[in-house]
Amino acid sequence: MMSAVSAINPGLILIVLGIVTCFIPVKRVRACLTVGAPLLGLAILMMADRGVALATIPLLNTELTLYYVDSLNFIFGVGFLLTAFLYGTYSLHSHDKAHEGAALIFAGSAIAAVFSGDLMTLFIFWEIGTASAAFLIFKAGTKAAYQAGMRFIGFHVLSGVLFLDGLIYIQKKSDGFSFAEAGLIESFSHPAAAYLFGALAIKAAFPLVHTWLKDVTPKTTTLGGILLPLLTTILAVYALARLFPGFSALIWIGALMAAYSVVFAAVVDDARRILAYGQNALCGLMVCAVGIGTPLAINAAAGLAFMSLIVVGLLSMSIGAVLYSTGTAKLTELGGLWRTMPFTALFAIAGAVGLSGVPLFIGAVSIPMAMSAIAQSMGLIITCAALIGIAGLIYALCLRLPVGLMFGHDSRKRPREAPFNMLLAMGLSALISVLLALPNVIPGFGYDWLYNLLPCTARVSPASCEVTGVPLIGYEPYTLMNVINVLQLILGVLLVSLVLRGFAFRKKRTARIILDTDWFYRKWGYAFAVWTGAVWRKTGPALSAFSNRLSGRIFFRLEETFSPRGALAKVDFNGGAAIWSAVLLGFVMMVVLLSRS
């Protein structure tokens, strides 16, 4: 019985219970399901064997692996299940069963995709997640949410089509969909690699296709704004680490993501949009580490992903609590909320400190590892871009965001404190952030627990950690050099922010419209579509009438010539007619032969 239970993909449990939740009218039962399902999934994951296919189903001439666990997806799965539990707790005040069910399905699809043992299963669960994410966006019920949801569907349908095209190429070559048969690292020139890379570029929000992330995050529901940006982008980072570790183009793409996104995070007004850009920058650091591909870099990418789920999630929950209490998340309309929301302010500070890399918080055991991996393997340009990304994150997410929400100028808003379940979820996130960063003084806790989950230090290591021939490594975060480097970066950002803040006090705070690369298709593309429609309205009827008259005349001439009552039927079948018929017959045969070839 236990072996049968341990062969169930934990994500499938969340998907099934999420569907059930949509039809349960009793709130307490729904609460038990949304909180209990991730805990049940964690228990099942802990019983799973590593490196073997735990559940398979036949499909046509191949076999799909529904459940596979190794050290690479284990840490991502643990992080996703913890995230689902925290946000299940966070949403206990909700009375919308469809919303709760869709959020559970979305989290379950991400978890099931992480533990998929082949590309086809990964694709299926990913598309289930896309559908449930679109529902969360539309559930906001506003015109802006509808428009953003349609753009989200456009981006991710394109991603799904590219992924499916890649699967078709792989299936033709190898008659299977397993990661090993893909052979993408050895031969990126294979068409499947280009298609899959394009699909993952959209999911991971690479530059120029990143705008869906900042577009939908501030317009979806409160719970959707927390789950959607985190799970979608980090799942894409996992897929890149699985398929393309050590691919050098990812180094430059990730560095550009990190440096580019923090510029917008430092100037936009909506707190949820700031967090979306910050998450994009963090994903850039992860992508850069995946591109480096050394064991330390792979560990750094996994550690940053786990950290994002905890501390970026904590900041997201703080913003969601403010949005729930005030109805807005715009920094120009907020400030001074600490007077009536002291616990939310405390947890927002905890999330900011945890992300900044201050010792004894989880960022202190993840960020130095990423800095070391990049500095040891890369040149000056990439290292500087990564440092700009980290410094921008500290400024935008660790200083600007909590200060703008809770302190700063007094907005004279006096909202009530967030509901107890929201505070409980934020408190648990803050507690995890501290417990996983402590020196190993408490048995079972401390950064060694987190490091033992990392892919290149665990018992069963993925191929990406062995391909370089470097032995598996450990890491010590609290060396004097690591602590000094992080503190220097924090103090530098503080100094620059104080200088900038001195100039900012002289200006009145006003909301601004910040344009990103989506301006090209939302302005020029829309204008071109409007112009095309106007031209067609004027010329369409005339062109349609002309084409109808032309086709009618051609048909009439053909009928007049070749019908039994036509011109050819009225003449004797003499030599000229025979030659004409032979020419026509030869033309028809040529068309048939060409069409067959």
Image (cartoon, rainbow, N blue to C red):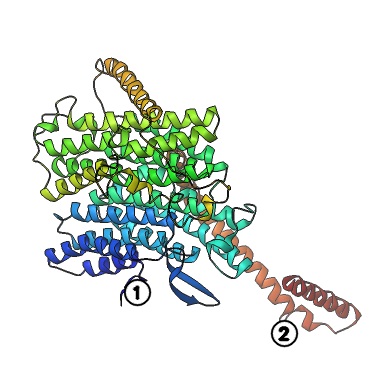
Task: Specify which label sits upstream in the sequence, 2 or 1.
Answer: 1
Identify the disc placed on residue 3.
1
Q: Secondary structure at mark 1?
A: helix
| Amino acid at pointer 2 | Pro
Q: Secondary structure at mark 2?
A: loop
Measure how far apart labels 2 and 1 are at the Cα level.
78 Å
- The x, y position of residue 283, in whole percent, is 42, 42
Q: Is residue 528 visible?
A: no
Quick check: 268 above or below 124? above
Q: Quadrant of residue 61?
A: bottom right
Quick check: 260 above or below 65? above
| Amino acid at pointer 1 | Ser
Q: Nearer the viewer, mark 2 or mark 1?
A: 1
Residue matched to label 2 = 564
Left or right of 109 in this view: 51: right
Q: Quadrant of the C terminus?
A: bottom right
Left or right of 89 in this view: 71: right
Q: Quadrant of the N terminus?
A: bottom left
Of residues 99 and 109, the one nearer the viewer is 109
